[in-house]
Image: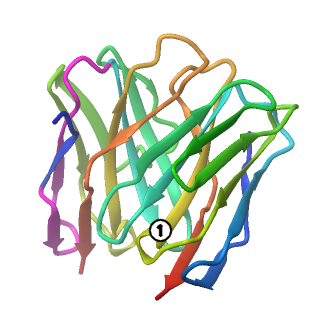
Amino acid sequence: TQLLEQSPQFLSIQEGENLTVYCNSSSVFSSLQWYRQEPGEGPVLLVTVVTGGEVKKLKRLTFQFGDARKDSSLHITAAQPGDTGLYLCAGGGSTNAGKSTFGDGTTLTVKP
Amino acid sequence: DARVTQTPRHKVTEMGQEVTMRCQPILGHNTVFWYRQTMMQGLELLAYFRNRAPLDDSGMPKDRFSAEMPDATLATLKIQPSEPRDSAVYFCASGWAVSAGKDEAFFGQGTRLTVV
């Protein structure tokens, strides 16, 4: 079974601060997705990383896939209240296309 | 604006009653997932389909849960009989998976089920 551990579980910061959340596993993934979920809504896909060492930027969000494709990080610069939500990472299986393993998520609160 | 549509958004039912949740996946997607989300367990995969064929339903309690795709535009998840421990948010998601390299899923807004 491929497991993904996310840390920290909860994070509360002030607007304007920077933060990094992590997604770690002992398994290798063919791809890794990051999602953000707001209360009462379904998760929304933010990004997919595929290549070891890959870095992708989405405005103030920077996503990195580990060289060995076992871990990933999400860095947010100058956080805003609109960034508040549950951030989930999901790893794609190497042998079972379409079936991803989800981490338990990081709940981020950005206070104005 | 393509999106996954789930109905109903909310359902309150009494223990022992049958519950049916419906999902319209994004047109053209070949993979459909059913997930359950609770505070304790997070997101759990219940079942998924590829080209309407069930691929894996190992996450689903077989005695009371059933999932089907009668056609490419409709997926259903049925619970019979329902129990209070089934209370959760149930998400349907769809995606286009042709190889093990980009397993993206697009989620609906979920059905919040409460069994009393």
Instruction: Give the image location of residue B42, x and y in percent.
Output: 53, 63
Q: Is residue B8 visible?
A: yes
Instruction: Give the image location of residue B31, x and y in percent.
Output: 37, 24
B10 and B64: which is toward the camera = B10
Residue at numbered disc 1: A83
A13 and A30: which is toward the camera = A13
Q: How is the image coloured?
A: rainbow
Task: Name the residue rendered at 25%, 55% in the picture.
Answer: B109
A83 and A38: which is toward the camera = A83
Give the left or right position of residue B92, taking residue B99 as reference.
Answer: left
Magenta-colored span: B8-29
Give the left or right position of residue A64, taking residue B15 as reference.
Answer: right
Mark 1: secondary structure: helix
Instruction: Give the image location of residue B93, x and y in percent.
Output: 34, 39
Give the left or right position of residue A17, taking residue A73 as reference.
Answer: left
Task: Name the residue rendered at 56%, 20% in the picture.
Answer: A97
Quarter assignment of residue B48:
top left
Chain letter of the residue beneath label 1 in the structure image: A
Of the 4 image quadrants, the one containing the N terminus of chain A is: top right
Q: On screen, B97 above or below B115?
A: above
Task: Name the residue rendered at 73%, 24% in the picture.
Answer: A51
Q: Is residue A1 visible?
A: no
Asked whether residue B54 is drawn in magenta, I would say no
Task: Name the residue rendered at 35%, 72% in the picture.
Answer: A39
Asked whether residue B9 is drawn in magenta, I would say yes
At label 1, the amino acid type is Asp
Quarter assignment of residue A54:
top right
Crowding at dot 1, Cα within 10 Å, few <14 / some 14-19 / many 20+, comes out as: some
